[in-house]
Image (cartoon, helix red, strand yellow):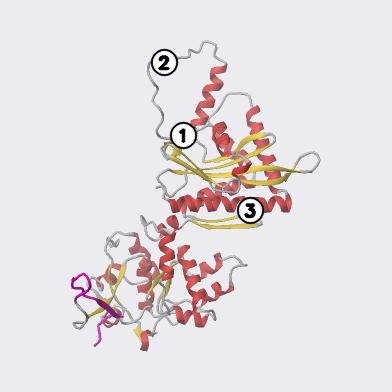
Amino acid sequence: MEVNPLNIFFVKSDSKGDRLLFRYPYTLENKDERKQEKCGRHNPYAIHITEDLLQNPQSQTSNICKGQLSGFTDEMLSTLFAVKAELCNRKFELKVNDVRFVGHPTLLPYRTNKDDTAAMILINIVFALQASASHSIVKCYYDLSKRLGKALRHEEKRCSYLTEEMKIMLAAHDELSTLDGEVNSGENDEENSRHSRSTLARSMKAVFEELSSTGIVQVRINKWVLLSFCLPQKAHQMHNKGLIIEPETIDKCVQRLRPYHGILLMVDPNDLLASIPLDSSQALLRLIKAYSPLKSLQTLAIEADISLTQAFQLTGHLVYWAKATVIYPLCEGNVYVVAPGANIHIHSQLVEEFAKEFPGLCLLQMLSEFSLPAPLWYVCRSGVSTGEWGPRGGVRGGAGGSGAGRLARRVAWLLRRRLLLQLHTYVQFNSPHWPRQRSHGHPEHVFVELSEIRGKTET
């Protein structure tokens, strides 16, 4: 998958030269080469095969082997990533065969060992991606590298954090290089343990693993600076596997929000409130506390005591982080049908999840009510749900202290897992009195969209 990173690197460059201090994951290729070098030094009878100069050697066209980066030594990478000072604080992008390296070189002062005077050092946190990654994905990784550089600059200025962490990394590298003896099978564990001494190395490892698993990064650098980042192309796949949502698509969606739209949280509201940092926007907290799939954005804005424009912005933020999706508020006139491609297999894991969430009910029986397009008032009459829709789309007789009925909870559960699709009825008016001839002499029919009616069309 082109969204996931291949590797993460940390390179420093100062008066002592360039050095690759961290790379993750650790490839086995470099270890095999190091084993051959160590074995070759002590074998005076080794035969070196020279290349046939009459034949041109085939150039390597791929640097990805079994999903891992290959063909790059540490010295080669440190030379590539340690750019000149003139190229710092701007986008770094390098393409080699089928690999694209993205980073943001940062030049910052740090404390020296002897006289505690400030010197300049260049650091670069680089992500290795597949060369086929889209422009928006590359832009997201560049933004993440830039944020990491700013966080390290802040901590270096506050408590010389970067200086101390580089000392630990350099000491670990020197310790490993001075080890003399045979290379055993536990070298991978040894390399993991030496990097685990550095909190910065553990943080960059956590960044890589969270990007590969969920696309949402929540890492606190030096237990002080909270780094929050979302890769929407990956995060939205947790709810809809295989679907890649570009940030530009989310921006267009936010621009088309209207007061009659609503939101559907993709996670539990209590879990979402617990995951939000303490210094976050109070308006966002109030919006989540007032949340209900039965309410429109205009109603949520009034109850949360925020402006409608601010409600639109917060909705876009929740959608970007894959915490919510935009819907029409649930009401008795909404018409739903089973979504094409929905996982409705009898042995689907969703069957067990539905039975656990709603004891005594069957998911397949619930979906059978929507095998043909049906409004919620019809499903309520069929006897599947014991909730009763009240006036103006409200629900009475439902379970839970929030006032939401049982049917609304079940429909929201189905929508959250993309099992239902809402249908709309549109009325179009074609006026016979509209001029049929224009300057070019071609007839033209103008269609005017009058309104959108949910459920049945009323005249």
Residue 53 numbered tag? 2
Q: How many marks?
A: 3
Which residue is located at x 51 percent, y 70 percent?
Answer: 270
Q: Provide the secondary structure element on which disc 2 rests.
A: loop
Q: Quadrant of the C terminus?
A: bottom left
Q: Is residue 194 left or right of residue 241?
A: right
Identify which amino acid the numbered label 1 is placed on: Ser
Q: Position of residue 301 (x, y in %)?
A: 50, 79
Q: Earlier in the sequence, mark 1 or mark 3?
A: 1
Q: Is residue 369 left or right of residue 172?
A: left
- Magenta residues, start to end: 437-459
Which residue is located at x 51 percent, y 67 percent?
Answer: 272
Q: Provide the secondary structure element on which disc 3 rests.
A: helix
Residue position for label 3: 151
**Farthest-out residue, top:** 45
Category of crowding for the residue at label 3, using alpha-carbon neighbours closer than 10 angstroms: few (below 14), some (14–19), many (at least 20): some
- Residue 94 sits above or below residue 345 on the image: above
Which residue is located at x 37 percent, y 71 percent?
Answer: 359
> Disc 3 versus disc 2: distance between alpha carbons?
51 Å
